[in-house]
Amino acid sequence: MTATGERARQLHNTCAGSVDIELFLHYSLIPSLCIILVLSFLQRREHCRRRDDTSYLLGDHFGVIIPLDFVGTFSNRWSYGIAFGATANKVMLLFSEGYRPLQVPQWAQAFVLLVGGIEVGLSHFPFFACLSSEFRLLSSILGFSYSLIWFVVTVLHITQCPHGPFLGRFETVIFYWPSLLCLSFLLGRFLHMAVKSLRVHLGWVPQTEEKPFLEFHQAEHVKQLLRKPPLQEEKKSWFQTRIYEWDPCFQFPSRMIGTVVLAFICLYLFIVTEFCVFVYLREKLDVFEGTLENYIASVNQTGTLTPVILQVKELMNVSKGVWLVTILPASVTCVSYLFHILACYRKHMKRLWAGNRLFLPLKFHSPSSSGSVVAIARYSGWQIAYILWGYFIIHVMQSLLGMVIMYSLVLPIIHNQGLEMLHGLGIGILTVSIVLGLMVVQVWIASSFFLQPKMSATDKQKPLALNNRKAFHNFSYFLFFYNVLLGLGACLSRLLISCILGTWLIARIDRTIMQRGYEGADMGFGAWVGMLYVDHYHTNPVLVSFCHILIAGHRERRLQQVIKYGDLNQSAGARVSPRARTRWLLLQTLINNPRLVMLRKSKPDHGSREFIQILLTCSES
Protein backbone atom coordinates (compact mmCIF):
# COMPACT_ATOMS: atom_id res chain seq x y z
CA MET A 1 0.00 0.00 0.00
CA THR A 2 2.84 2.35 0.75
CA ALA A 3 4.52 1.63 -2.57
CA THR A 4 1.24 2.21 -4.40
CA GLY A 5 0.76 5.50 -2.55
CA GLU A 6 4.27 6.60 -3.43
CA ARG A 7 3.73 5.80 -7.12
CA ALA A 8 0.40 7.60 -7.13
CA ARG A 9 1.97 10.59 -5.39
CA GLN A 10 4.68 10.73 -8.03
CA LEU A 11 2.07 10.54 -10.78
CA HIS A 12 0.06 13.26 -9.07
CA ASN A 13 3.06 15.52 -8.68
CA THR A 14 4.04 15.12 -12.34
CA CYS A 15 0.42 15.48 -13.58
CA ALA A 16 -0.31 18.92 -14.98
CA GLY A 17 -3.78 18.89 -16.50
CA SER A 18 -5.00 21.53 -18.90
CA VAL A 19 -8.24 21.91 -16.92
CA ASP A 20 -8.38 23.47 -13.47
CA ILE A 21 -11.80 23.05 -11.86
CA GLU A 22 -11.44 26.06 -9.55
CA LEU A 23 -10.25 28.28 -12.40
CA PHE A 24 -13.09 27.07 -14.61
CA LEU A 25 -15.50 27.92 -11.80
CA HIS A 26 -14.48 31.58 -12.20
CA TYR A 27 -14.86 31.51 -15.98
CA SER A 28 -18.19 29.70 -15.78
CA LEU A 29 -19.73 32.91 -14.45
CA ILE A 30 -19.65 34.35 -18.00
CA PRO A 31 -22.02 31.82 -19.62
CA SER A 32 -24.01 31.67 -16.40
CA LEU A 33 -24.68 35.43 -16.49
CA CYS A 34 -25.54 35.23 -20.18
CA ILE A 35 -28.13 32.51 -19.53
CA ILE A 36 -29.55 34.48 -16.62
CA LEU A 37 -29.87 37.63 -18.77
CA VAL A 38 -31.60 35.73 -21.58
CA LEU A 39 -34.11 34.07 -19.26
CA SER A 40 -34.65 37.34 -17.40
CA PHE A 41 -35.34 39.16 -20.68
CA LEU A 42 -37.95 36.60 -21.64
CA GLN A 43 -39.54 36.67 -18.20
CA ARG A 44 -42.49 39.07 -18.13
CA ARG A 45 -43.15 41.36 -15.23
CA GLU A 46 -46.63 41.21 -13.83
CA HIS A 47 -46.78 44.92 -12.86
CA CYS A 48 -45.33 47.28 -15.46
CA ARG A 49 -44.21 50.72 -14.45
CA ARG A 50 -45.78 53.97 -15.58
CA ARG A 51 -45.02 55.54 -18.94
CA ASP A 52 -43.24 58.49 -17.39
CA ASP A 53 -40.76 56.11 -15.70
CA THR A 54 -37.29 55.89 -17.25
CA SER A 55 -37.42 52.07 -17.31
CA TYR A 56 -40.60 51.99 -19.36
CA LEU A 57 -38.53 51.52 -22.53
CA LEU A 58 -37.90 47.94 -21.36
CA GLY A 59 -41.61 47.25 -21.42
CA ASP A 60 -42.53 44.27 -19.29
CA HIS A 61 -39.22 42.47 -19.97
CA PHE A 62 -36.47 41.59 -17.49
CA GLY A 63 -38.60 39.97 -14.86
CA VAL A 64 -37.13 38.31 -11.79
CA ILE A 65 -36.33 34.64 -12.31
CA ILE A 66 -36.20 32.25 -9.40
CA PRO A 67 -33.97 29.16 -9.25
CA LEU A 68 -36.29 27.22 -6.98
CA ASP A 69 -39.45 27.91 -5.05
CA PHE A 70 -38.30 27.00 -1.55
CA VAL A 71 -41.88 27.01 -0.26
CA GLY A 72 -44.46 24.64 -1.67
CA THR A 73 -42.79 23.21 -4.80
CA PHE A 74 -43.75 19.60 -5.50
CA SER A 75 -42.99 19.32 -9.23
CA ASN A 76 -39.59 18.25 -10.63
CA ARG A 77 -38.52 17.31 -7.12
CA TRP A 78 -35.88 14.80 -8.12
CA SER A 79 -34.58 17.04 -10.90
CA TYR A 80 -33.97 19.81 -8.39
CA GLY A 81 -32.45 17.29 -5.99
CA ILE A 82 -30.00 16.04 -8.63
CA ALA A 83 -29.17 19.65 -9.51
CA PHE A 84 -28.26 20.18 -5.87
CA GLY A 85 -26.19 17.01 -6.00
CA ALA A 86 -24.16 18.44 -8.90
CA THR A 87 -22.91 21.15 -6.53
CA ALA A 88 -21.64 18.69 -3.90
CA ASN A 89 -17.91 19.01 -4.67
CA LYS A 90 -18.07 22.81 -4.47
CA VAL A 91 -20.08 22.65 -1.26
CA MET A 92 -17.40 20.44 0.28
CA LEU A 93 -14.77 22.99 -0.73
CA LEU A 94 -16.78 25.68 1.03
CA PHE A 95 -17.31 23.42 4.05
CA SER A 96 -13.58 22.85 4.41
CA GLU A 97 -12.88 26.55 3.71
CA GLY A 98 -10.66 25.37 0.89
CA TYR A 99 -12.20 27.69 -1.71
CA ARG A 100 -11.11 31.28 -1.18
CA PRO A 101 -11.32 33.39 -4.34
CA LEU A 102 -9.73 36.41 -2.63
CA GLN A 103 -6.72 36.90 -0.38
CA VAL A 104 -7.73 39.12 2.53
CA PRO A 105 -6.72 39.52 6.18
CA GLN A 106 -7.81 36.94 8.71
CA TRP A 107 -10.57 39.11 10.19
CA ALA A 108 -12.29 39.36 6.80
CA GLN A 109 -12.45 35.62 6.08
CA ALA A 110 -16.20 35.57 6.76
CA PHE A 111 -16.76 38.01 3.88
CA VAL A 112 -14.53 35.90 1.63
CA LEU A 113 -16.59 32.81 2.41
CA LEU A 114 -19.75 34.81 1.65
CA VAL A 115 -18.32 35.87 -1.70
CA GLY A 116 -17.27 32.28 -2.40
CA GLY A 117 -20.73 30.99 -1.58
CA ILE A 118 -22.35 33.57 -3.87
CA GLU A 119 -19.93 32.68 -6.67
CA VAL A 120 -20.62 28.95 -6.34
CA GLY A 121 -24.36 29.61 -6.27
CA LEU A 122 -24.16 31.89 -9.31
CA SER A 123 -22.14 29.37 -11.31
CA HIS A 124 -24.80 26.67 -10.74
CA PHE A 125 -27.77 29.03 -11.01
CA PRO A 126 -28.55 28.05 -14.67
CA PHE A 127 -29.26 24.45 -13.65
CA PHE A 128 -32.15 25.53 -11.44
CA ALA A 129 -33.29 28.48 -13.56
CA CYS A 130 -33.59 26.34 -16.70
CA LEU A 131 -35.56 23.71 -14.79
CA SER A 132 -38.05 26.25 -13.41
CA SER A 133 -38.37 28.55 -16.45
CA GLU A 134 -41.70 28.83 -18.27
CA PHE A 135 -39.98 28.92 -21.66
CA ARG A 136 -39.36 25.21 -21.82
CA LEU A 137 -37.80 24.92 -25.28
CA LEU A 138 -35.19 27.65 -24.94
CA SER A 139 -34.43 26.91 -21.29
CA SER A 140 -33.94 23.20 -22.03
CA ILE A 141 -31.48 24.03 -24.84
CA LEU A 142 -29.57 26.46 -22.62
CA GLY A 143 -29.59 24.03 -19.68
CA PHE A 144 -28.40 21.15 -21.86
CA SER A 145 -25.56 23.25 -23.28
CA TYR A 146 -24.44 24.49 -19.85
CA SER A 147 -24.62 21.00 -18.34
CA LEU A 148 -22.67 19.61 -21.28
CA ILE A 149 -19.90 22.17 -20.70
CA TRP A 150 -19.58 21.16 -17.05
CA PHE A 151 -19.73 17.47 -17.97
CA VAL A 152 -16.95 17.79 -20.57
CA VAL A 153 -14.73 19.83 -18.25
CA THR A 154 -15.20 17.32 -15.40
CA VAL A 155 -14.41 14.37 -17.69
CA LEU A 156 -11.27 16.12 -18.97
CA HIS A 157 -10.18 16.83 -15.41
CA ILE A 158 -10.65 13.16 -14.48
CA THR A 159 -9.01 11.66 -17.55
CA GLN A 160 -5.95 13.92 -17.43
CA CYS A 161 -5.24 13.35 -13.72
CA PRO A 162 -7.12 10.22 -12.60
CA HIS A 163 -4.71 9.34 -9.76
CA GLY A 164 -4.19 11.09 -6.45
CA PRO A 165 -1.70 11.32 -3.59
CA PHE A 166 -3.78 9.43 -0.99
CA LEU A 167 -5.86 6.61 -2.45
CA GLY A 168 -3.58 6.02 -5.39
CA ARG A 169 -5.19 4.88 -8.62
CA PHE A 170 -8.52 6.43 -9.69
CA GLU A 171 -8.70 8.76 -6.69
CA THR A 172 -10.14 11.59 -8.81
CA VAL A 173 -12.80 9.23 -10.17
CA ILE A 174 -13.82 8.29 -6.63
CA PHE A 175 -14.28 11.96 -5.77
CA TYR A 176 -16.06 13.11 -8.93
CA TRP A 177 -18.27 10.22 -10.01
CA PRO A 178 -21.31 11.57 -8.07
CA SER A 179 -21.02 14.89 -9.92
CA LEU A 180 -20.70 13.07 -13.25
CA LEU A 181 -23.78 11.00 -12.44
CA CYS A 182 -25.77 14.12 -11.55
CA LEU A 183 -24.62 15.96 -14.67
CA SER A 184 -25.56 12.93 -16.80
CA PHE A 185 -29.03 12.95 -15.27
CA LEU A 186 -29.40 16.68 -15.97
CA LEU A 187 -28.33 16.15 -19.58
CA GLY A 188 -31.00 13.51 -20.00
CA ARG A 189 -33.58 15.66 -18.23
CA PHE A 190 -32.92 18.74 -20.37
CA LEU A 191 -32.91 16.59 -23.52
CA HIS A 192 -36.30 15.15 -22.53
CA MET A 193 -37.61 18.67 -21.89
CA ALA A 194 -36.34 19.84 -25.28
CA VAL A 195 -37.96 16.97 -27.19
CA LYS A 196 -41.24 17.38 -25.32
CA SER A 197 -41.30 21.16 -25.85
CA LEU A 198 -40.42 20.78 -29.53
CA ARG A 199 -43.31 18.40 -30.10
CA VAL A 200 -45.65 20.90 -28.45
CA HIS A 201 -44.19 23.74 -30.52
CA LEU A 202 -44.69 21.81 -33.77
CA GLY A 203 -48.26 20.99 -32.79
CA TRP A 204 -47.76 17.22 -32.64
CA VAL A 205 -49.10 17.03 -29.09
CA PRO A 206 -51.45 19.41 -27.27
CA GLN A 207 -49.94 21.88 -24.87
CA THR A 208 -50.10 20.83 -21.26
CA GLU A 209 -52.12 22.85 -18.82
CA GLU A 210 -50.48 25.28 -16.46
CA LYS A 211 -49.35 24.16 -13.05
CA PRO A 212 -52.40 23.62 -10.81
CA PHE A 213 -52.78 25.73 -7.72
CA LEU A 214 -54.00 22.72 -5.74
CA GLU A 215 -51.77 19.67 -5.97
CA PHE A 216 -53.32 16.24 -6.38
CA HIS A 217 -51.99 14.87 -3.08
CA GLN A 218 -53.30 17.93 -1.23
CA ALA A 219 -56.77 17.38 -2.64
CA GLU A 220 -56.59 13.71 -1.68
CA HIS A 221 -55.61 14.68 1.87
CA VAL A 222 -58.67 16.93 2.20
CA LYS A 223 -60.91 14.20 0.76
CA GLN A 224 -59.48 11.77 3.29
CA LEU A 225 -60.35 14.18 6.11
CA LEU A 226 -63.94 14.44 4.88
CA ARG A 227 -64.42 10.68 4.73
CA LYS A 228 -65.65 8.75 7.72
CA PRO A 229 -62.88 6.86 9.48
CA PRO A 230 -63.04 3.09 9.00
CA LEU A 231 -64.58 1.11 11.82
CA GLN A 232 -61.64 -1.28 11.89
CA GLU A 233 -58.11 -0.26 11.01
CA GLU A 234 -56.19 -2.29 8.47
CA LYS A 235 -53.44 -4.51 9.78
CA LYS A 236 -50.00 -3.11 9.07
CA SER A 237 -46.92 -5.11 8.24
CA TRP A 238 -43.78 -5.14 10.34
CA PHE A 239 -42.08 -2.76 7.90
CA GLN A 240 -44.99 -0.30 8.06
CA THR A 241 -45.12 -0.45 11.85
CA ARG A 242 -41.43 -0.31 12.68
CA ILE A 243 -39.70 1.42 9.76
CA TYR A 244 -41.83 3.41 7.30
CA GLU A 245 -45.39 3.58 6.03
CA TRP A 246 -46.09 5.07 2.61
CA ASP A 247 -48.66 7.88 2.53
CA PRO A 248 -50.06 8.72 -0.94
CA CYS A 249 -51.63 11.92 0.46
CA PHE A 250 -48.28 13.43 1.41
CA GLN A 251 -45.32 14.52 -0.69
CA PHE A 252 -42.03 15.99 0.42
CA PRO A 253 -41.27 19.40 -1.11
CA SER A 254 -38.37 19.91 -3.50
CA ARG A 255 -36.32 21.60 -0.78
CA MET A 256 -36.35 18.49 1.42
CA ILE A 257 -35.51 16.17 -1.49
CA GLY A 258 -32.64 18.42 -2.58
CA THR A 259 -31.34 18.67 0.99
CA VAL A 260 -31.30 14.90 1.46
CA VAL A 261 -29.67 14.21 -1.93
CA LEU A 262 -26.96 16.81 -1.34
CA ALA A 263 -26.44 15.55 2.22
CA PHE A 264 -25.94 11.98 0.94
CA ILE A 265 -23.32 13.03 -1.61
CA CYS A 266 -21.54 15.39 0.81
CA LEU A 267 -21.47 12.66 3.46
CA TYR A 268 -19.92 10.28 0.92
CA LEU A 269 -17.29 12.87 -0.04
CA PHE A 270 -16.59 13.60 3.63
CA ILE A 271 -16.06 9.90 4.40
CA VAL A 272 -13.77 9.50 1.39
CA THR A 273 -11.79 12.58 2.43
CA GLU A 274 -11.49 11.25 5.98
CA PHE A 275 -10.30 7.91 4.63
CA CYS A 276 -7.69 9.70 2.51
CA VAL A 277 -6.42 11.51 5.59
CA PHE A 278 -6.38 8.20 7.46
CA VAL A 279 -4.30 6.56 4.71
CA TYR A 280 -1.87 9.46 4.77
CA LEU A 281 -1.52 9.37 8.56
CA ARG A 282 -1.16 5.59 8.52
CA GLU A 283 1.79 5.87 6.17
CA LYS A 284 3.37 8.40 8.49
CA LEU A 285 2.70 6.17 11.47
CA ASP A 286 4.24 3.20 9.65
CA VAL A 287 7.39 5.23 9.15
CA PHE A 288 7.32 6.17 12.82
CA GLU A 289 6.84 2.53 13.81
CA GLY A 290 9.84 1.55 11.70
CA THR A 291 11.89 4.12 13.57
CA LEU A 292 10.59 2.73 16.86
CA GLU A 293 11.52 -0.84 15.86
CA ASN A 294 15.03 0.27 15.04
CA TYR A 295 15.19 2.04 18.36
CA ILE A 296 13.87 -1.08 20.14
CA ALA A 297 16.57 -3.18 18.48
CA SER A 298 19.21 -0.84 19.79
CA VAL A 299 17.66 -0.57 23.26
CA ASN A 300 17.22 -4.35 23.68
CA GLN A 301 20.95 -4.63 24.23
CA THR A 302 20.56 -2.73 27.49
CA GLY A 303 16.99 -3.88 28.25
CA THR A 304 15.55 -0.46 29.15
CA LEU A 305 12.42 1.37 27.94
CA THR A 306 11.29 -1.57 25.81
CA PRO A 307 7.88 -2.13 27.53
CA VAL A 308 6.96 1.55 27.19
CA ILE A 309 7.83 1.67 23.52
CA LEU A 310 5.93 -1.56 22.88
CA GLN A 311 2.87 -0.10 24.58
CA VAL A 312 3.12 3.00 22.38
CA LYS A 313 3.34 0.81 19.29
CA GLU A 314 0.37 -1.25 20.47
CA LEU A 315 -1.63 1.92 21.09
CA MET A 316 -0.98 3.14 17.54
CA ASN A 317 -1.97 -0.22 16.04
CA VAL A 318 -5.15 -0.42 18.11
CA SER A 319 -6.06 3.18 17.26
CA LYS A 320 -5.65 2.59 13.53
CA GLY A 321 -7.72 -0.59 13.64
CA VAL A 322 -10.50 0.89 15.74
CA TRP A 323 -10.71 4.05 13.61
CA LEU A 324 -10.96 2.00 10.42
CA VAL A 325 -13.57 -0.40 11.82
CA THR A 326 -15.84 2.35 13.20
CA ILE A 327 -16.18 4.10 9.81
CA LEU A 328 -19.00 1.75 8.84
CA PRO A 329 -21.22 2.09 11.96
CA ALA A 330 -20.76 5.88 12.01
CA SER A 331 -21.75 6.05 8.33
CA VAL A 332 -24.78 3.82 8.84
CA THR A 333 -25.87 5.96 11.80
CA CYS A 334 -25.79 9.22 9.80
CA VAL A 335 -27.49 7.63 6.78
CA SER A 336 -30.28 6.38 9.05
CA TYR A 337 -30.56 9.92 10.44
CA LEU A 338 -31.25 11.29 6.95
CA PHE A 339 -34.15 8.87 6.45
CA HIS A 340 -35.38 9.50 9.98
CA ILE A 341 -35.38 13.27 9.39
CA LEU A 342 -37.74 12.78 6.44
CA ALA A 343 -40.02 10.64 8.59
CA CYS A 344 -39.99 13.25 11.37
CA TYR A 345 -40.75 16.02 8.87
CA ARG A 346 -43.88 14.20 7.71
CA LYS A 347 -44.93 13.37 11.27
CA HIS A 348 -44.45 16.94 12.51
CA MET A 349 -46.19 18.49 9.50
CA LYS A 350 -49.23 16.27 9.98
CA ARG A 351 -49.40 17.22 13.64
CA LEU A 352 -49.29 20.92 12.77
CA TRP A 353 -52.00 20.44 10.12
CA ALA A 354 -54.14 18.85 12.81
CA GLY A 355 -53.52 21.81 15.15
CA ASN A 356 -51.36 19.82 17.56
CA ARG A 357 -48.35 21.78 18.86
CA LEU A 358 -47.81 19.87 22.08
CA PHE A 359 -44.80 18.04 20.63
CA LEU A 360 -42.93 21.37 20.52
CA PRO A 361 -41.50 23.19 23.55
CA LEU A 362 -43.76 25.90 24.92
CA LYS A 363 -41.64 28.81 23.69
CA PHE A 364 -41.87 27.48 20.11
CA HIS A 365 -45.68 27.48 19.99
CA SER A 366 -45.68 30.97 18.45
CA PRO A 367 -42.26 31.63 16.88
CA SER A 368 -41.16 34.90 15.34
CA SER A 369 -42.36 35.47 11.77
CA SER A 370 -39.07 37.01 10.66
CA GLY A 371 -37.12 34.23 12.33
CA SER A 372 -39.21 31.61 10.54
CA VAL A 373 -38.61 33.28 7.17
CA VAL A 374 -34.86 33.23 7.81
CA ALA A 375 -35.12 29.62 9.00
CA ILE A 376 -36.47 28.46 5.64
CA ALA A 377 -33.22 29.68 4.06
CA ARG A 378 -30.99 28.39 6.85
CA TYR A 379 -32.35 24.90 7.28
CA SER A 380 -30.96 23.16 4.19
CA GLY A 381 -27.40 24.42 4.67
CA TRP A 382 -27.43 23.82 8.41
CA GLN A 383 -28.81 20.32 7.99
CA ILE A 384 -25.90 19.34 5.74
CA ALA A 385 -23.37 20.88 8.12
CA TYR A 386 -24.98 19.11 11.09
CA ILE A 387 -24.81 15.77 9.29
CA LEU A 388 -21.13 16.18 8.38
CA TRP A 389 -20.01 17.38 11.80
CA GLY A 390 -22.32 14.82 13.42
CA TYR A 391 -20.64 12.03 11.49
CA PHE A 392 -17.20 13.18 12.62
CA ILE A 393 -18.24 13.50 16.27
CA ILE A 394 -20.05 10.14 16.24
CA HIS A 395 -17.01 8.55 14.65
CA VAL A 396 -14.74 9.95 17.37
CA MET A 397 -17.13 8.80 20.09
CA GLN A 398 -17.43 5.30 18.65
CA SER A 399 -13.63 5.12 18.32
CA LEU A 400 -13.22 6.01 21.98
CA LEU A 401 -15.80 3.37 22.87
CA GLY A 402 -13.91 0.87 20.73
CA MET A 403 -10.67 1.74 22.50
CA VAL A 404 -12.36 1.11 25.85
CA ILE A 405 -13.62 -2.28 24.67
CA MET A 406 -10.22 -3.23 23.27
CA TYR A 407 -8.28 -2.33 26.42
CA SER A 408 -10.84 -3.70 28.86
CA LEU A 409 -11.87 -6.95 27.10
CA VAL A 410 -9.86 -7.88 24.02
CA LEU A 411 -6.25 -7.02 24.84
CA PRO A 412 -6.27 -8.72 28.27
CA ILE A 413 -7.31 -11.96 26.55
CA ILE A 414 -4.59 -11.53 23.90
CA HIS A 415 -1.99 -10.97 26.65
CA ASN A 416 -3.16 -14.07 28.58
CA GLN A 417 -4.78 -11.97 31.27
CA GLY A 418 -8.34 -13.22 30.70
CA LEU A 419 -8.84 -14.47 34.27
CA GLU A 420 -7.76 -11.15 35.76
CA MET A 421 -10.03 -9.33 33.32
CA LEU A 422 -12.98 -11.55 34.21
CA HIS A 423 -12.24 -11.07 37.92
CA GLY A 424 -12.24 -7.28 37.61
CA LEU A 425 -15.28 -7.34 35.33
CA GLY A 426 -17.15 -9.55 37.76
CA ILE A 427 -16.38 -7.25 40.69
CA GLY A 428 -17.55 -4.23 38.70
CA ILE A 429 -20.78 -5.92 37.59
CA LEU A 430 -21.42 -7.14 41.14
CA THR A 431 -20.91 -3.64 42.59
CA VAL A 432 -23.26 -2.04 40.09
CA SER A 433 -25.80 -4.83 40.61
CA ILE A 434 -25.76 -4.30 44.39
CA VAL A 435 -26.25 -0.55 43.99
CA LEU A 436 -29.13 -1.02 41.58
CA GLY A 437 -30.55 -3.77 43.79
CA LEU A 438 -30.58 -1.48 46.83
CA MET A 439 -32.40 1.17 44.80
CA VAL A 440 -35.00 -1.39 43.73
CA VAL A 441 -35.35 -2.61 47.34
CA GLN A 442 -36.07 0.97 48.47
CA VAL A 443 -38.90 1.24 45.98
CA TRP A 444 -40.28 -2.18 47.02
CA ILE A 445 -40.20 -1.28 50.73
CA ALA A 446 -41.94 2.04 50.03
CA SER A 447 -44.64 0.29 48.00
CA SER A 448 -45.17 -2.51 50.53
CA PHE A 449 -45.03 -0.73 53.92
CA PHE A 450 -45.32 3.03 53.48
CA LEU A 451 -48.35 3.36 51.15
CA GLN A 452 -52.00 2.77 52.03
CA PRO A 453 -53.86 -0.09 50.31
CA LYS A 454 -55.65 0.33 46.98
CA MET A 455 -59.10 1.83 47.13
CA SER A 456 -60.29 -0.40 44.30
CA ALA A 457 -59.11 -3.71 42.92
CA THR A 458 -58.98 -2.24 39.43
CA ASP A 459 -56.44 0.46 40.37
CA LYS A 460 -53.03 0.03 38.79
CA GLN A 461 -51.11 1.33 41.79
CA LYS A 462 -51.62 2.39 45.38
CA PRO A 463 -52.69 5.96 46.17
CA LEU A 464 -50.08 8.49 47.21
CA ALA A 465 -51.07 8.37 50.85
CA LEU A 466 -48.50 7.62 53.58
CA ASN A 467 -48.86 4.71 55.95
CA ASN A 468 -46.72 3.77 58.99
CA ARG A 469 -45.41 7.32 59.27
CA LYS A 470 -43.02 6.68 62.19
CA ALA A 471 -41.30 3.83 60.41
CA PHE A 472 -41.18 5.94 57.25
CA HIS A 473 -39.40 8.79 59.04
CA ASN A 474 -36.78 6.42 60.45
CA PHE A 475 -36.38 4.82 57.02
CA SER A 476 -35.78 8.22 55.40
CA TYR A 477 -33.35 9.32 58.14
CA PHE A 478 -31.00 6.34 57.93
CA LEU A 479 -31.02 6.25 54.14
CA PHE A 480 -30.23 9.98 53.98
CA PHE A 481 -26.51 9.47 54.55
CA TYR A 482 -26.31 6.50 52.17
CA ASN A 483 -28.07 8.43 49.39
CA VAL A 484 -25.48 11.22 49.71
CA LEU A 485 -22.82 8.73 48.64
CA LEU A 486 -25.15 7.20 46.05
CA GLY A 487 -25.83 10.64 44.60
CA LEU A 488 -22.19 10.96 43.52
CA GLY A 489 -22.52 7.96 41.24
CA ALA A 490 -25.91 9.18 40.00
CA CYS A 491 -24.38 12.57 39.18
CA LEU A 492 -21.52 11.00 37.23
CA SER A 493 -23.93 8.70 35.38
CA ARG A 494 -26.07 11.72 34.49
CA LEU A 495 -23.05 13.50 33.07
CA LEU A 496 -21.96 10.41 31.13
CA ILE A 497 -25.42 9.76 29.70
CA SER A 498 -25.79 13.43 28.72
CA CYS A 499 -22.45 13.38 26.90
CA ILE A 500 -23.26 10.14 25.09
CA LEU A 501 -26.75 11.24 24.03
CA GLY A 502 -25.57 14.74 23.13
CA THR A 503 -22.81 13.51 20.87
CA TRP A 504 -24.94 10.69 19.44
CA LEU A 505 -27.81 13.06 18.55
CA ILE A 506 -25.73 16.05 17.45
CA ALA A 507 -26.67 15.40 13.81
CA ARG A 508 -30.40 15.26 14.62
CA ILE A 509 -31.60 18.78 13.90
CA ASP A 510 -35.23 17.71 14.28
CA ARG A 511 -34.93 17.41 18.08
CA THR A 512 -33.23 19.54 20.68
CA ILE A 513 -30.49 18.25 22.94
CA MET A 514 -30.94 21.11 25.41
CA GLN A 515 -32.73 20.79 28.72
CA ARG A 516 -36.25 22.07 29.20
CA GLY A 517 -36.25 25.84 29.38
CA TYR A 518 -33.05 26.20 27.36
CA GLU A 519 -34.38 25.02 23.98
CA GLY A 520 -34.01 28.52 22.55
CA ALA A 521 -30.22 28.18 22.71
CA ASP A 522 -30.38 25.34 20.16
CA MET A 523 -30.18 27.31 16.91
CA GLY A 524 -30.45 24.20 14.76
CA PHE A 525 -33.72 23.14 16.35
CA GLY A 526 -34.97 26.72 16.02
CA ALA A 527 -34.28 26.57 12.27
CA TRP A 528 -36.16 23.27 12.06
CA VAL A 529 -39.22 24.64 13.87
CA GLY A 530 -39.22 27.87 11.82
CA MET A 531 -39.06 25.85 8.61
CA LEU A 532 -41.97 23.69 9.77
CA TYR A 533 -44.13 26.73 10.47
CA VAL A 534 -43.42 28.32 7.08
CA ASP A 535 -44.35 25.09 5.31
CA HIS A 536 -47.38 24.71 7.55
CA TYR A 537 -48.74 28.17 6.77
CA HIS A 538 -48.04 27.98 3.03
CA THR A 539 -48.74 24.33 2.15
CA ASN A 540 -51.52 23.34 4.55
CA PRO A 541 -53.84 21.27 2.33
CA VAL A 542 -57.00 22.61 3.98
CA LEU A 543 -55.89 26.23 3.54
CA VAL A 544 -54.72 25.65 -0.04
CA SER A 545 -58.00 23.92 -0.86
CA PHE A 546 -59.96 26.86 0.55
CA CYS A 547 -57.92 29.33 -1.52
CA HIS A 548 -58.40 27.10 -4.57
CA ILE A 549 -62.17 27.21 -4.09
CA LEU A 550 -62.09 31.03 -3.82
CA ILE A 551 -59.96 31.40 -6.95
CA ALA A 552 -62.07 28.95 -8.92
CA GLY A 553 -65.24 30.74 -7.86
CA HIS A 554 -63.82 34.11 -8.84
CA ARG A 555 -62.80 32.82 -12.26
CA GLU A 556 -66.21 31.28 -12.77
CA ARG A 557 -67.96 34.56 -11.96
CA ARG A 558 -65.72 36.44 -14.40
CA LEU A 559 -66.40 33.85 -17.07
CA GLN A 560 -70.14 34.18 -16.52
CA GLN A 561 -69.87 37.96 -16.89
CA VAL A 562 -67.97 37.60 -20.15
CA ILE A 563 -70.55 35.13 -21.44
CA LYS A 564 -73.32 37.51 -20.37
CA TYR A 565 -71.84 40.45 -22.30
CA GLY A 566 -71.19 38.17 -25.26
CA ASP A 567 -74.83 37.03 -25.30
CA LEU A 568 -75.99 40.67 -25.23
CA ASN A 569 -73.79 41.53 -28.17
CA GLN A 570 -74.95 38.51 -30.16
CA SER A 571 -78.61 39.31 -29.47
CA ALA A 572 -78.10 42.85 -30.75
CA GLY A 573 -76.65 41.43 -33.97
CA ALA A 574 -73.56 43.65 -33.84
CA ARG A 575 -69.93 42.75 -33.34
CA VAL A 576 -68.28 45.02 -30.76
CA SER A 577 -64.51 45.18 -30.45
CA PRO A 578 -62.84 44.65 -27.05
CA ARG A 579 -61.55 48.24 -27.14
CA ALA A 580 -65.05 49.65 -27.59
CA ARG A 581 -66.39 47.43 -24.80
CA THR A 582 -63.60 48.63 -22.50
CA ARG A 583 -64.37 52.27 -23.28
CA TRP A 584 -68.04 51.68 -22.67
CA LEU A 585 -67.32 50.13 -19.28
CA LEU A 586 -64.98 53.04 -18.49
CA LEU A 587 -67.70 55.55 -19.36
CA GLN A 588 -70.18 53.70 -17.19
CA THR A 589 -67.71 53.73 -14.28
CA LEU A 590 -67.03 57.46 -14.65
CA ILE A 591 -70.73 58.29 -14.79
CA ASN A 592 -71.34 56.35 -11.58
CA ASN A 593 -68.17 57.79 -9.94
CA PRO A 594 -67.61 61.25 -11.46
CA ARG A 595 -65.00 62.23 -8.86
CA LEU A 596 -62.61 59.72 -10.46
CA VAL A 597 -62.41 61.97 -13.53
CA MET A 598 -60.09 64.38 -11.71
CA LEU A 599 -57.63 61.56 -11.03
CA ARG A 600 -57.31 60.52 -14.68
CA LYS A 601 -54.65 61.80 -17.05
CA SER A 602 -56.20 63.13 -20.24
CA LYS A 603 -55.13 65.21 -23.24
CA PRO A 604 -55.57 68.96 -22.68
CA ASP A 605 -58.00 69.50 -25.58
CA HIS A 606 -61.35 71.27 -25.60
CA GLY A 607 -63.43 68.09 -25.81
CA SER A 608 -61.97 66.50 -22.70
CA ARG A 609 -62.35 69.63 -20.59
CA GLU A 610 -65.96 69.97 -21.71
CA PHE A 611 -66.59 66.29 -20.88
CA ILE A 612 -65.09 66.69 -17.41
CA GLN A 613 -67.18 69.81 -16.76
CA ILE A 614 -70.37 67.98 -17.80
CA LEU A 615 -69.64 65.06 -15.49
CA LEU A 616 -68.82 67.34 -12.54
CA THR A 617 -72.02 69.35 -13.14
CA CYS A 618 -74.05 66.17 -13.22
CA SER A 619 -72.49 65.00 -9.98
CA GLU A 620 -73.17 68.30 -8.20
CA SER A 621 -76.75 68.35 -9.38
Image (spheres, rainbow, N blue to C red):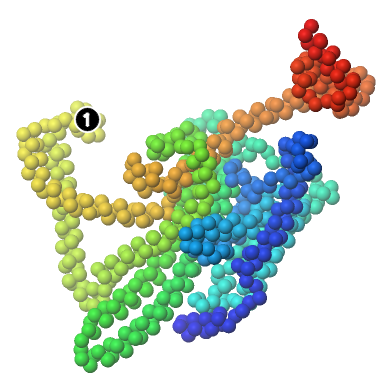
Reply above or below: 533 against 390: above
Residue 20 falls in image quadrant: bottom right
Q: Is residue 546 left or right of residue 211?
A: left
Give percent across and percent down for residue 415. Answer: 23, 77
Is residue 375 or residue 566 the one in the foreground? 375
Task: Report if residue 346 is visible in the image.
Answer: no
Give percent across and percent down for residue 608. Answer: 87, 21
Q: Residue at x 73, y 26 (%)?
A: 556
Q: Is residue 275 left or right of residue 255?
A: left
Q: Residue at x 84, y 50 (%)?
A: 202
Q: Is residue 332 left or right of residue 224?
A: left
Tag 1: amino acid: Ala
- The residue at which mark 1 appears reads as 457
Q: Residue at x 33, y 45 (%)?
A: 515
Q: Secondary structure at mark 1?
A: loop
Task: Report if residue 14 is visible in the image.
Answer: yes
Q: Residue furthest right?
A: 573
Is residue 113 or residue 320 the one in the foreground? 113
Give percent across and percent down for residue 584. Answer: 85, 21
Residue 397 falls in image quadrant: bottom left
Which image quarter holds the C terminus?
top right
